[in-house]
Image (cartoon, rainbow, N blue to C red):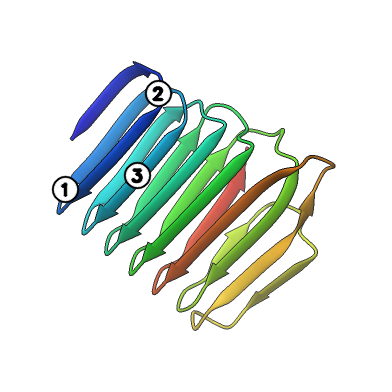
Amino acid sequence: MDLRNIRGNVDVSTTSSRVTAEEIIGDWHSSTEYSSVTLRGLSAQRVSMLNKSNPIDVQLKTAPSRIEIRNEYGSVAVSMPAGFGGDVDLNATYGTVETNLSLDRKKSFGGAGGYAFGKVGSGSGKISIETTSGNIKLMQR
């Protein structure tokens, strides 16, 4: 499934697919199983994703106010510009957590799990990313 140049909110639900999206201006919500999800050039205030058994890769053009991603048996990579302010909670049950945000607490258990959480800036936003058997990479560029 390819989505390109959309202005407006997107709501995707699919099983056993490859979802790719480019240049979306609007909030993103997806509920997928056995699907890879790749988003490029997303300008969204809210990003909500549930997935099972494949990777999620998100490149944001604008700093979001809320990200909530849950991925079972797959890794999550999020790249976003500077400007986010709020709470961050990253948790990988069997995987690693990598971030360049200055968070209060970071802990890695050598691939057997890891977490990072804390507050960035003074905003009221929220980023929550959780994986089971997958890595988390959250980078601000």
Q: Residue at x 47, y 31 (%)?
A: 27
Residue at image x 52%, y 56%? 137
| Quarter of the image with the C terminus in it | top right
Q: Which mark sits nearer the N-terminus, 1 or 3?
A: 1
The x and y percentages for residue 2 are 21, 30
CA distance for labels 3 and 2: 13 Å
- Neighbourhood count class around disc 3 (C-alpha, 10 Å): few under 14, some 14–19, many 20 upward: some
Spatial separation of the CA atoms under disc 1 and disc 3: 12 Å
Left or right, residue 129 beside residue 12: right
Task: Give the residue furthest to the left.
Answer: 16
Q: Is residue 97 above or below residue 108?
A: above
Q: Position of residue 42 (x, y in %)?
A: 45, 29
Tag 3 and tag 2, C-beta contact below 8 Å: no
Q: Secondary structure at mark 3?
A: strand
Disc sitting over residue 104 in the figure: none
User: Which amino acid type corresponds to the residue marked 2 in the rendered image?
Assistant: Ile
On the image, which quarter does residue 98 sit in?
Answer: bottom right
- Label 2: which residue? 24
Mark 1 vs mark 3, foreground winner is 3
Q: Secondary structure at mark 2?
A: strand
Label 1 belongs to which residue?
17
Label 1: which secondary element: loop
Q: Mark 3 — residue?
A: 30
Residue 108 horizontal/vertical position (percent)? 61, 77
User: The residue under label 3 is which amino acid type?
Assistant: Ser
Report crowding for label 1: few under 14, some 14 to 19, many 20 or more residues within 10 A (C-alpha): some
Residue drawn at x 20%, y 47% as measured from the top left = 14
Q: Distance from label 2 to label 1 (Cα)?
A: 19 Å
Q: Amino acid at mark 1?
A: Ser
Left or right, residue 127 beside residue 72: right
Which comes before the other along the chain, label 3 or label 2? 2
